[in-house]
């Protein structure tokens, strides 16, 4: 890599705002908030970035499904645009 042109890539802890789950990874993001994280070398301090959605709370990964009211959508369409004449 060319020196001096790449952003600092360092360990960061991300926290899910919904579930509170945290995980340690590497990122170029920075934060003023910090958190103590236990590692094999002892407890270390890392920047903490709080995010709205992670795999811990996303419906695709948790198996949760959003119920879609398709019948209500069809009725709304017919009210707005009318029904097609049959025949």
Image (cartoon, rainbow, N blue to C red):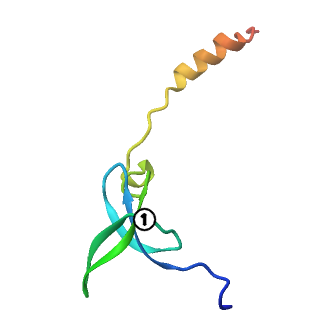
Q: Residue furthest front?
A: 32
Q: Give 54 or 44, whichever is nearer the viewer.
A: 44
Residue 2 screen position, x and y as percent: 68, 91
Q: Quadrant of residue 15?
A: bottom left
Residue sitting at x 64%, y 10%: 79
- Does residue 54 show up? no
Number of residues whose C-alpha sits closer than 10 Å to that of mark 1, classed few (under 14), some (14–19) or many (20 or more): few
Residue 66 in which image quadrant: top left
For this view, does 36 lie left or right of residue 8? Answer: left
Q: Secondary structure at mark 1?
A: loop
Residue 56 in view in this figure: yes
Q: Nearer the viewer, residue 31 or 9?
A: 31
Instruction: Give me the residue at 44% from left, 33% from top.
Output: 67
Relative height, residue 76 to residue 16 (above, below): above
Disc 1 designates what residue?
32
Query: Residue 83: x percent and y percent?
Result: 70, 10
Residue pictured at 42% horizontal, 65% vertical: 32
The N terminus, quarter of image: bottom right
Question: Picture coordinates of residue 76 (x, y %)?
Answer: 60, 16
**Quarter placement of the C terminus:** top right
- Looking at the image, how many numbered discs can be counted on the residues? 1
Give the camera-side residue of 66 and 57: 57
Residue 55: x percent and y percent? 41, 58
């Amino acid at each position: 890599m060319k020196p001096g042109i790449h952003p600092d890539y360092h360990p960061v802890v991300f926290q899910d705002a919904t579930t509170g789950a945290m995980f340690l990874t590497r990122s170029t993001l920075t934060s003023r908030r910090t958190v103590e994280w236990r590692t094999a070398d002892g407890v270390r301090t890392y920047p903490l970035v709080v995010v709205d959605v992670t795999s811990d709370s996303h419906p695709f990964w948790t198996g949760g499904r959003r119920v879609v009211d398709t019948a209500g959508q069809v009725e709304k369409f017919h009210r707005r645009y009318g029904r097609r004449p049959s025949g």
